Image (spheres, rainbow, N blue to C red):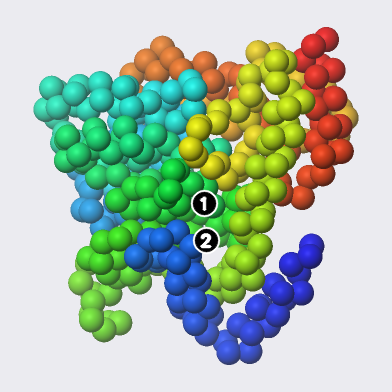
């Protein structure tokens, strides 16, 4: 890869100074990421999952608290809520965006309020496949009910909505640097963003076991949630070309759209938003046939996600069973993600589309 010499140089520097935990590259990355997003504070952490967990811990979320999230997402979004013994409340997604449906969110908040069993505290919109959720509508509802917004931007880092970058769209934002995400490191990693200095201080304490003024003074129960220095160094080396990579992903998406339009259901887009295009995800009714045909031609595809979370064995206890969130259930049966990365050429996209159209229109 063209970035390899620069990445190697950054790794060597870390090996030389030997500060593997919270070394200077971590602080340098945090300030670079804060600058890029416009967020006042960035806290680099061990993974996207830990970022979500620490955000909820900073807000003191626990038993008796309702946390609203889309049913059509990666497990981690729900798992952190269950781990804290709070109540995950699954919300259906909007068919036009694959993201949390503000109208269903409003219904679910009212339902939880009328049941009176737990208190609505947080909504976790997920920017699925890289496209920011409907933060203006969610924000209005959250303000009405005094609910905090934790943006799960694990897939959307590098995206925008209007004049705002992903990172400043929620009260807190969690992102991931897992290798397959738009900005990937060489292992696990993540970051959190907020404008609130008190929350930022809490997050910094939580990621080092809840440390107080000194290392051995423990002010609260925390976790080991640090990003390691080598990962920070790798991300610093990748950051200068990241905007070009997001542009390239958008170009690849445009090439796909142009070829596939009228033949399959294209991925959601939103006027005024820039997707980070973590995935290019179409809908096809005969998914397994299409997948097998592409596989036979050496074209890898993936299904994110074959089952919405409210139907997963571990989470059924929180949900209302099959038929309760119809859009999430319908979409899960049809979504198919085709190759997407910034270094795909127009010819490669063309070849993938030819193979795809061959089976779809057969
Ligand atoms: C990847 C992902 C996470 C978790 O990130 P990790 O860094 O793998 O822990 C959380 N939410 C969503 C939507 C994701 O795609």
Question: Compared with residue 281, is residue 17 higher up or lower down, i.e. above or below?
Answer: below
Kindly state the secondary structure of the residue where label 2 is placed.
loop
Please report contact status of discs 1 and 2: CB closer than 8 Å, yes or no: no
State yes or no: Cβ of the residue under disc 2 lies below 8 Å from any atom of ligand 1: yes
Q: Nearer the viewer, residue 160 or 356?
A: 160
Q: Nearer the viewer, residue 225 or 193?
A: 193
Q: Tell me where residue 204 appears, x and y as whole percent.
A: 33, 69
Kindly state the secondary structure of the residue where label 1 is placed.
loop
Indicate the quadrant where residue 222 lies.
Answer: bottom left
Q: Tell me where residue 181 appears, x and y as whole percent.
A: 59, 50
Indicate the quadrant where residue 326 lies.
Answer: top left
Q: CA distance from mark 1 to mark 2?
A: 13 Å
Q: Residue at x 87, y 38 (%)?
A: 347
Q: Residue at x 41, y 61 (%)?
A: 38
Question: Compared with residue 74, is residue 169 higher up or lower down, i.e. above or below?
Answer: below
10 Å neighbourhood of mark 1: few (<14), some, or many (≥20)? many
Q: Residue at x 80, y 27 (%)?
A: 353
Q: Tell me where residue 305 appears, x and y as whole percent.
A: 56, 30
The quadrant the N terminus occupies is: bottom right
Q: Nearer the viewer, mark 1 or mark 2?
A: 1
Which label sits on residue 157?
1
Residue 63, visible in the rendered structure: yes
Q: Residue at x 38, y 26 (%)?
A: 101
Q: Is residue 70 left or right of residue 241?
A: left
Q: Which residue position holds label 2?
A: 189
């Amino acid at each position: 890869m063209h970035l390899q010499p620069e990445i190697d140089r950054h790794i060597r520097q870390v090996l030389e100074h030997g500060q593997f935990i919270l070394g200077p590259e971590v602080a340098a990355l945090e300030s670079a990421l804060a600058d890029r997003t416009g967020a006042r504070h960035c806290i680099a952490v061990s993974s996207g999952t830990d970022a979500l967990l620490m955000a909820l811990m900073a807000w003191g979320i626990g038993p008796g608290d309702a946390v609203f999230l889309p049913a059509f997402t990666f497990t981690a979004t729900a798992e952190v809520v269950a781990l804290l013994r709070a109540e995950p409340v699954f919300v259906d997604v909007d068919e036009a965006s694959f993201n949390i449906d503000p109208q269903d969110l409003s219904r679910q908040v009212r339902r939880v309020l009328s049941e009176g069993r737990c208190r609505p505290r947080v909504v976790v919109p997920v920017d699925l496949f890289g496209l920011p959720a409907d933060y203006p509508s969610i924000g209005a509802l959250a303000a009405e009910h005094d609910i905090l917004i934790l943006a799960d931007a694990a897939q959307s880092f590098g995206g925008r909505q209007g004049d705002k970058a992903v990172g400043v769209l929620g009260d807190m934002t969690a992102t991931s640097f897992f290798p397959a995400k738009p900005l990937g490191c060489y292992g696990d990693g993540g970051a959190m963003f907020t404008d609130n200095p008190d929350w930022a201080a809490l997050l910094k304490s939580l990621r080092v076991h809840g440390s107080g003024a000194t290392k051995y003074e423990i002010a609260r129960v925390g976790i080991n949630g640090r990003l390691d220095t080598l990962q920070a160094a790798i991300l610093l080396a990748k950051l200068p070309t990241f905007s070009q990579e997001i542009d390239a992903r958008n170009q690849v998406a445009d090439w796909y759209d142009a070829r596939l339009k009228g033949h399959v259901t294209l991925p959601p887009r939103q006027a005024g938003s820039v997707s980070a295009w973590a995935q290019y995800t179409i809908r096809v009714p005969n998914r397994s046939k299409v997948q097998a045909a592409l596989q036979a031609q050496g074209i890898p595809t993936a299904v994110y996600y074959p089952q919405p979370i409210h139907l997963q064995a571990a989470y059924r206890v929180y949900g209302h069973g099959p038929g309760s969130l119809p859009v999430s259930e319908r979409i899960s049966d049809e979504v198919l993600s085709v190759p997407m990365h910034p270094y795909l050429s127009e010819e490669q996209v063309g070849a993938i589309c030819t193979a795809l159209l061959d089976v779809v229109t057969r």
